[in-house]
Every structure is written in C-alpha cells, then in structure tokens.
Amino acid sequence: MTATVAPTLLHGDVHVGDALPELRYQVTATTVVLGALATRDWRPMHHDKDFAVNRNGTQDIFLNTPNQAAWFERFLTDWTGPHGRLARVTFRMKGSVFPDDVMMLRGVVEETEVDATGCGFVSVAVTLAVEDDTKTTCAARIALPRTAGDNPWARRGDQWLPSPIALPEVDRHVGP
Amino acid sequence: MTADLLPRALEMVGLVQYAEVGEFPVERGYIWSSCASVENGNPLFWDDAVAGALTGGPIAPPTMVSVWFRPHNWAPGRTEVALPLQVHFDLKALFDLPEAVMTDNTIEFHTPVRIGDVLRTHQVLRSISEEKTTKLGTGRFWVIDVVYANQDAELVAVESYTGFGYQRASGGAGS
C-alpha cells in the first residue's frame, strides 16, 4: 500500500521576493563535531580546538562545508516540505562558524520558472550569518509541485533538468 | 616562478582521473546521523510511507553525495591517510603551494541516491588560472569537477569546486 502525501507548498504559491521562515540556531562544539563526523570529515580542525587555533590560526573548531550544505538543505526543505526536490546549490564561503555563534539562515525567492519539461522551479538566495556577518551564501534551485498531484521526484532522464545553465562541458560518461 | 609548471598542469585539464568505487554501500545510519546533526525532520528520510509515496523508497539527502566517498580514517593495509579530491592535492604539490582554501562549491543533483547504492566517482580538472595575489597570498585558482554515478551508471551528481592554492605572503602555518 502506498500512502498519499499532500504537498506542503505549490509552485504557484511562491512569488519573487517572498522570504523563507528564518532559522536561528545556537552552535555548540557538539554541533561542529557531530556535523563533521556525520559527513565523515575526520580533519582535526573540526574536532580539535588546539589544532584549529595553533595550526589553522582560527579562534576555535568550525563547521565544515558538507555540514553547512546539510544545514542549507534542511532550511530549504523545512519550507518546501518533502515534495521539494533540490536541483542545484552553489556555496560561497566567506567566513567560519564557531561554537557559541548563533547562526541565522535567511532566504529570499529570486526567481520562479517553469522549464521546458513543465517542471516548476524556484531560485532562492540563502545566507548563513552570525550577527550581521555573512559567513556563507548559497544560491539554490529547488523544484516544487505545480499541482496537488505533481511530484518532482517522479521526474527522470530528460524530464529532470536540474541546472538552467549547463556546468562547464565535462566528460560525464559514467558507463563501464 | 611556477609559470614553467603550468603547461604540465594544463595537460591534466579535461582528463578523467581517480575513478573510484565507494568503500561501502549507502546506509541509513549515516543518513540519520546527518539529519540529526542539522535537526532535519524531513519525513522523506524518517518515514518509509512518505518515502514510498514520493521517491519509491528511502533515499539519502541529496547534499550527502560527497559523504559516500570520504575514505575511512584507517583501513587494513593503508599506510597513508587517503585524501578526497586528490586532484586538488596534486595541484598543491605540483605548484608547491602549501596552503589552500575552497572558495566556491556547486552541486547539481540528478538521480537520487538510494540505500544500498554503491556509488562511483571520477575527477576532472576543468581549469587553472594564471598566478594571482589575494589577501591570503600568491597562488592559483583551479576548478575541479567531481562526477558521481550509481552502480547502474546513472548520473547522480556533478560537483564543481573552485580552489585557491597559495603561498602565504609572510610565513606561518595554515590548513
């Protein structure tokens, strides 16, 4: 038996300029270490304060990039619900997030579009800041259902175009 | 000073390098640890009924794609720490640039990753800049793509990193 899951947010409900619900989080050493281990990042600057301070010259251990990606994903899908299908993210790291920081994630819808296959996408500019200092920016493109019966996750092959702008041409041959 | 090394590095541009198979199948314990680390309650990853309805069964959070290729910190017979994104470290060594940072990271998501998948990957150097000086020091920018596929050769994700390898202007230790 397959359950029916109603979408939380439809593409047509979203407009340019909409602000996503903010996410405020008190970072601790546990946050940093848990995030590093969950992403299999064993490098000492994410769990060893002595190394981080004396070798890296930072004030403390700090959140690693893959864990920040997980924070951004959580922030976006808290808003979209489980139908939201992440298509593409671009991060730019400007500073580090340390224990005792209170991080704020904020997002604004920059674009809505329906692509040539009929898939509805929204582009969101997300910032991760500590006080007023932006630590990381993230440009995200995420698919949303256009109707109650639509499901972006059902798209495959040429019906799923995660990037409106092709990445640099690369040998994407993945066969044997 | 490193200009004479540039032609050697440019020979690597566009080549498929470091084709690897993941050391372990995708498993739910790590998915739940990752979700717990960011308090992600998306039912897609916790509720099999929701996953069944939307994705035909449990999947991994898309942003976890690189997690499945981070080597164990130790493995039998391994004498050196294995490094992810080896092309990045090759370029640091080639140009003798002891420090490096990643400035940009783009991930494009294709076929979802499922429990039990054994992923494979390869790396492609896309470009290397001329020598540049930033507030960090003097060095070069490079762009490396990491391509991920599943055991059925379906494209899972393409990740693109921009790195800056550099020499500090005035000594000191770094990452």
Image (cartoon, rainbow, N blue to C red):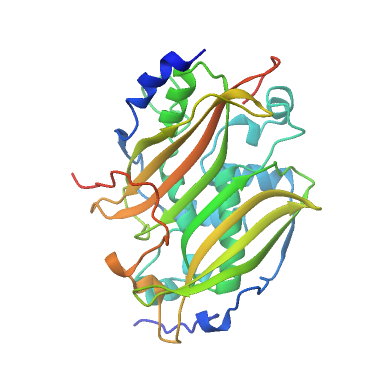
Q: Which residue is drawn at the image coordinates 28% and 65% (left, top)?
A: A157
Q: What is the count of numbered marks?
A: 0
> Left or right: A29 with respect to B67?
right
Farthest bottom residue in view: A148
Q: Nearer the viewer, residue A119 or A169?
A: A169
Q: Which residue is drawn at the image coordinates 62% and 63% (left, top)?
A: A75
Q: Position of residue B163 (x, y in %)?
A: 52, 34
Q: Nearer the viewer, residue A62 or B118?
A: A62
Q: Which residue is drawn at the image coordinates 24% and 51% (left, top)?
A: B153
> Left or right: B131 with respect to A173?
right
Question: Residue A138: which quarter of the image?
Answer: bottom right
Q: Which residue is drawn at the image coordinates 62% and 30% (left, top)?
A: A44
Q: Position of residue B54 (x, y in %)?
A: 40, 74
Question: Residue B169: which quarter of the image?
Answer: top right
Q: Quadrant of the N terminus of chain A?
A: bottom left
Q: Quadrant of the C terminus of chain A?
A: top left
Q: Position of residue B61 (x, y in %)?
A: 47, 59
Farthest left residue in view: A176
Q: Position of residue A153 (x, y in %)?
A: 39, 71
Q: Determine whether B68 is above or below B113 in the image.
A: above
- Whether residue B41 appears in this view of the structure is no
- Whether residue B110 appears in this view of the structure is yes
